[in-house]
Structures are given as C-alpha cells and as structure tokens.
Amino acid sequence: MMRYQDPALPVAERVDDLLARMSLDEKIGQMTQAERLESDEADVTAYRLGSVLSGGGSVPEPNAPKTWADMYDGLQRAALRTPLGIPILYGVDAVHGHGNVVGATVFPHNIGLGATRDPGLVREIGAAVAREVTGTGITWNFAPCLGVVRNPRWGRTYESFGELSELPVVMTSYIAGLQGPRVGPPPSVMATAKHYIGDGGTDDGDDQGDTRLSEAELRVLHLPPFLAALRLGVGSIMISLSAWNGVKVHGHRYLITDVLKNELGFTGIVVSDWNGLDEIFGRDEFTGEEVRAAINAGIDMVMVPERWRQFIDVLREEVKAGRVPMSRIDDANRRILTKKFEQGLFEHPLTDRSYLELIGSDEHRALARRAVAASQVVLKNEAGLLPLAPGARRIFVAGRAADDIGMQCGGWTISWQGSPGAITDGTTILEGVRAAAGPDATVVHDAGGAGIDSSFDVAIAVVGEEPYAEDEGDLPGDMGLEACDLETIARLREAGVPVVVVLVSGRPLDIAAELPGWDAFVAAWLPGTEGDGVADVLFGAVPASGRLPVTWMRSTDQLPINDGDGQVPLFPYGYGLSLDSGES
C-alpha cells in the first residue's frame, strides 16, 4: 500500500504523497472537468480526468435513479483504472432538488425559500437533497446560488434568495444541510457557493453582464453571503460569468486569489462556470491567453464541457513555456485532491445504493410540501376571501399553470431550460385544490376558463411564466402577464364570481394595472413538484406566513427598485398578509 492509499494517515500527508507521484499530465487531468455527453469511460482513463459533470438535461437513458447510479459507477471505475487510481468528482446542478432526475423531489426555487424566512427549513432541504443526490453516487452539487438579485429582469432571479444580502446570508444553512458539519463521506455532498461575485447586480439585470460598483459597495452588498459560506466550510466556489467594472471575473486575479484565497483564506476548490474561459476576453474560442489568465487568476477546476481535450493541450504548453507556474498547478491539485480524500472517495468510490429508495420518497415530498406552503406570499385578500372554506362549494380552476408540473417547477428541471407538461412525478396545484376542497366540493377545471358562470362560489386562476433558465430568461422589455393569461382572468371576472389569482413565476411581474380587478392575489413563486402546498395555504390548512424576498415594482419604469432606495413600490420588501388578520 502506498502512503496516499492509507486512510489512517492525515489528509495533508496523503495529498503530499500522491502529488509527488503525479506527472504533469496527471495533474492537468485533475484540473479538467468534462461534460458526460462529450466524454466516455475510456476518456476518463486515458486523460486522467479529475471531474465529469452533467449539465442541465444531460441525463442517461432511461432517466431513472438506478440508471444514474450505474452511469456514475461506470465512470468511477474508469477513473480507478488509471495508474494512480484517483477517483473523479462528479458534478451536477441539483439547484432545487436533484432536478435532472425523473422522480426526484423538486423543492421550491430559492426565491420561494427566501420568502419562507426559515433557515432551519432550508437546512432540512439541503440534507434531503444530499440524500437524493447520494442515491445516484454523485458527490458534488453546484448549489446554492448566493447572488443578491437587484433587478428582476435578471433571468436567474429565482435562483437568488433575495435582494438584500441578509437573506442569502441566513440561507447558507442550505450548505450545512448539504455537506453536514464539513465536507465528508456520503451522505455529505460538497456544496458550491455561486457565483462569485456580483452576478445578481449587473446593469439592467443582464445575465453575464457587468456589475458596476465600487469595491466598497461590492463588499457590502455581494460579499456577505460568501463570507457566511466560508464560515460553514463550503467545499467549492464557482466563479461568475459576469464582469466587475468591465473585467470578467474568470480572469480576475485580485478577486479570486488576493481576496478569496489569500485575504479570506478559502482552501477549497475554485471552479469555473460553463465555458467560462470563453468569457474572459469575449471570444468564441479560448487560446493560451485565456487559459493562462484563468489559471493564474486562481481557478483550480476548469469546466470545459466540450473542448476539454484542447484545454489539456493548451494548459500543458502554457506550463512548459513557464507562463503558468508549477506552483499554481500544484496548488490547484492540492485543493482538488484534498476534497476527494475528505469525501472518502479513495476508500468508497462507488454508489451507496441504500440511498436510492429515498429519491422522491414520501418523507422528502412531505418536506417539500411544507416548504411550498411556507413560501406562499398573500399580497391581496379583499373581504377576507382567503382562506377558502372546504365543503359543499363550487370552485372553478383555470390558468395554464393550474395542472402543469413543468410550469410549477420552472427551469433546471429534467432539462436545462425546463418545459411545460408532465415532465416528472408530483402533485399539480389543481390536484392539491381538489384534495383540499374535500369530497363535498365541486371542482371544475378548464385552462382557458371556458364554462365559468355565476353558479360558482369562487374562481382560482393559476397563471404565470413558462420555464426558463439563465440568460434565456432575461426580460429586457415587457414584464407583464401573457395575453392568454389576461384573457383567462378576464373571462373569470366576467362571470361575476370572486377571483383568486395565483402567480407561478420566478420573479415579480408587472401586474399593478390588473390588480384592482383581482379579489385575492398570491405569489406562489416556482413551488416544484408538491403543488398541494399551495392549496394548503389557499384553504387554510397552513397559515400564510411568506414574506416578499424582493421589492415588487409598480411598473417596469421603476426598475431597478430595492428596499431603501426611496421609491414607492406596489409591495415593499418583507410584505405579506396573514390570512387570520389580513395584516402584514
């Protein structure tokens, strides 16, 4: 047995021993992260790859938990066939549950969790996600997003816990749930605090845009969540694709090495974002200049999903030419290998399949339902319409999102962008309403509102945004409801019955002009697979307790609008009605 293979030795000694045995090619391989669709088991062995990832929608066939575990074990066995037997880290974006996997529990997106104001609940969710991710063998999660959203035009608004750093700071409890007390063996899953730094504050909410702030402002507004993550021992930090005052963060040595590593003492893995090398100088292809800039800036693991072979060749040449020092290569490897040893991957590299049965389990779905209910924010409740009383009532349910798991879940669900439809297992809001209304109620559903008349006691319109992710969700123009949603609500109103509007969205929308015609209004955010949690609040089984994690604008003319900026919003940060009193 070689010293690095001895689990009785301290991790630092094992790392020193292994590093001394590694060639340059092995070290560069450890710094390379390839997409599974662009690599195979033979590549993992031949190129000594340090990591493989599944991007959004990169799934094995059939897309089922056991198939994921089989895929992971095959790639891990390929890594173990290398001369030194160094296991891979497999990364996945389990940003609101193990969302790539059909049948997994999908929790509310972060903006909804921010509305709960409940870090204990979020810690429980992190632990549940870790168990489900562990069931597929994976040990690295690219979550949570700790960006502080300052403009809802940003396509990643729903990935933020809120507009003031106080919310992302307390919601770093997710890291404690995901990792446990420290990065360790399963069911601990290494968390990733992302995206360092300032990606929620770009001009006009432009994803991958430019955050223009002084350093003092950047530190006050955008750094605190990362400081909180460091205190919890977060294992990795992902760099933002955005820029700070015109300089892309992926090549920013001051922010990555001087501040994050040296000043703040971060000893974990700094990982790039998807094709982040391409962002440094705004080119479509990376060259030695981009590779040199990224590695010398302090990035340890480079996510080069498709062009990873080119990256290996280019980095090798940069090192041989002396433009990237070996000290930087060794530092990156020390960080990567340390986490692999801490995770126990050398002793137990393959999937612990005892966790498979927990994926989509009743226990986890009950937790998700509780989180959904806690995230509902009641913003209007005329004449005490809510909560609705179960019993012998006639209830009409309409809207595109009423009976649609895909719309409930939003982006990063089964595919990168997500999609409407019955894409995974769960309970729709309509199904939740039927159950909550009880056997004596008559619940009629038509997505467009056809068939509504004055005989109904109440109408519920579940409307909102179709799924999107990242820059595909940026909204530089109109931010109102779609015409079809407005037509559905108008049809319900024409029947003369009270109308409850439930908005399924990843951000506030421009609804001020329509709001006077709605009797009640609930922000449901993107609740995930357990739509019965929405019904729990509508029917009073769970008291309304959610509070706005962002300021709700009166119109897009106010954007950006944030707490304390002197503007008068439609609903202020922290607003939410309690149904028993009607007071915030």
Image: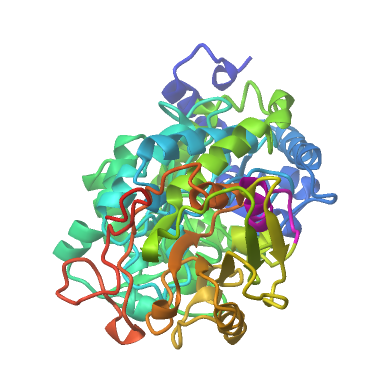
Which residue lies at the image location 31% right of the left edge and 43% below the top edge?
170
Q: Position of residue 582 (x, y in %)?
A: 32, 56
Left/right of residue 376 with respect to residue 68 in the rendered view: left
Which residue lies at the image location 65% right of the left edge and 70% below the top edge?
455
What is the quadrant of the N terminus in the image?
A: top right
**In the displayed image of the protein, which residue is found farthest to the top?**
8
Q: Which residues are magenta?
A: 422-436
Which residue lies at the image location 57% right of the left edge and 27% below the top edge?
187
Q: Does 424 lie within the magenta span? A: yes
Q: Position of residue 351 (x, y in %)?
A: 71, 29
In the depicted view, which residue is nearer to us: 270 or 455? Answer: 455
In the depicted view, which residue is nearer to us: 75 or 59? Answer: 59
In the depicted view, which residue is nearer to us: 458 or 12? Answer: 458
Any part of residue 401 in sight: no
Left/right of residue 61 with respect to residue 336 in the rendered view: right
Left/right of residue 256 with respect to residue 137 in the rendered view: left
**In the displayed image of the protein, which residue is found farthest to the right?**
62
In the depicted view, which residue is nearer to us: 542 or 548? Answer: 542
Q: Position of residue 135 (x, y in %)?
A: 68, 33
Determine which quarter of the picture holds residue 211.
bottom left
Which residue lies at the image location 39% right of the left edge and 45% below the top edge?
327
> Is residue 197 shown above or below 25?
below
